[in-house]
Image (spheres, rainbow, N blue to C red):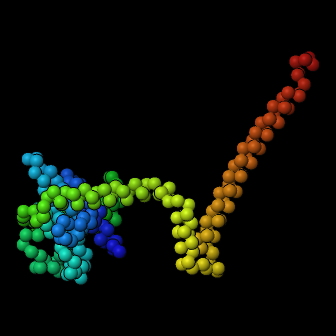
């Protein structure tokens, strides 16, 4: 599970890459079993060449020293770290690897911002990355990059369509599965089925009330029309 800080680094880096004019995607598996890079960006230069940048996000010292493979196969490669962690591991960072420091916006900055901030913080370059030749075949890397982009688009479409993607049988099985987590007879507000049934009852009552109000309004209008028809014409009496 990603921590809140990791998610903040990730969303800030995503915005940072967009501002650099790059295409970017998270969690891309590398060709030739080179691991999985946290974030990979693709940028086309004015001369038509492609520049690849790899970013590894670390939030704790234990995370930094993890045995997970670092996929620094790009032309430029970076660690993305909070300031405190950078100070602790600075001497351990290889010469050719760059470092971006994450700083969160404080509450006053957020409140005083004239527009909605697109990221929870900002990045500064603490150490520039040195150029290296691409460490994998570019055609293979492009294929992996496109596959990861498709994965993200597919996820977004599923979220947009929501429960429409699931059959009634799948939804019913999911409800049964969740009911096994426990049914507390003493705190029914926390039970899924009770909440669901109560919501249905409330919706049914609201719907019936709306229909009743509409019919009552029609009845009153019709009654008024009938009264007008049966009311004696004053001009005829005169």
**Quadrant in the picture for the C terminus:** top right
Q: Is residue 108 left or right of residue 102?
A: right
Point out residue 159 in the picture as x, y percentages from the top left corner: 42, 58
Q: Is residue 238 left or right of residue 181?
A: right
Classify 220 as above or below 111.
above
Point out residue 223 in the picture as x, y percentages from the top left corner: 82, 36
Residue 105 can be seen in this image: no
Residue closest to the eye, 160 or 151: 151
- Residue depicted at 10% across the width and 51% down the height: 49
Number of numbered discs overlaid on the protein picture: 0
Classify 44 as above or below 201.
above
Residue closest to the eye, 224 or 69: 69
Classify 130 as above or below 47.
below
- Residue depicted at 30% across the width and 60% down the height: 119
Residue 57 can be seen in this image: yes
Q: Is residue 182 left or right of residue 143?
A: right
- Residue depicted at 47% across the width and 57% down the height: 165
Residue closest to the eye, 127 or 191: 191
**On the image, which quarter does residue 196 sit in?**
bottom right
- Residue depicted at 23% across the width and 69% down the height: 36
**Quadrant in the picture for the N terminus:** bottom left
Farthest right residue in view? 237
Point out residue 74 in the picture as x, y percentages from the top left corner: 13, 63
Point out residue 93 in the picture as x, y percentages from the top left corner: 12, 76
Residue closest to the eye, 56 or 86: 56
């Amino acid at each position: 599970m990603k921590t809140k800080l990791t998610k903040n680094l990730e969303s800030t880096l995503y915005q940072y890459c967009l501002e650099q004019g790059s295409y970017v995607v998270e969690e891309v598996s590398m060709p030739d079993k080179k691991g999985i890079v946290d974030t990979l960006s693709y940028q086309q230069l004015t001369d038509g060449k492609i520049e690849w940048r790899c970013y590894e996000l670390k939030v704790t010292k234990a995370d930094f020293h993890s045995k997970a493979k670092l996929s620094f196969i790009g032309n430029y490669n970076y660690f993305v770290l909070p300031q405190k962690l950078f100070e602790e591991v600075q001497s351990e960072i290889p010469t050719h690897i760059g470092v971006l420091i994450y700083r969160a916006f404080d509450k006053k900055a957020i409140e005083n911002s004239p527009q909605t901030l697109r990221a929870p913080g900002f990045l500064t370059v603490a150490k520039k990355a040195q150029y290296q030749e691409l460490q994998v075949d570019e055609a293979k890397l492009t294929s992996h990059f496109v596959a990861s982009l498709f994965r993200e688009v597919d996820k977004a479409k599923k979220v947009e369509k929501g429960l429409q993607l699931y059959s009634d049988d799948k939804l019913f099985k999911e409800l049964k599965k969740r009911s096994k987590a426990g049914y507390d007879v003493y705190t029914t507000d926390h039970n899924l089925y009770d909440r669901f049934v109560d919501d249905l009852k409330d919706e049914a009552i609201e719907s019936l009330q709306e229909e009743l109000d509409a019919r009552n309004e029609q009845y009153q209008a019709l009654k008024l029309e009938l009264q007008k028809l049966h009311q004696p014409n004053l001009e005829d009496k005169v």
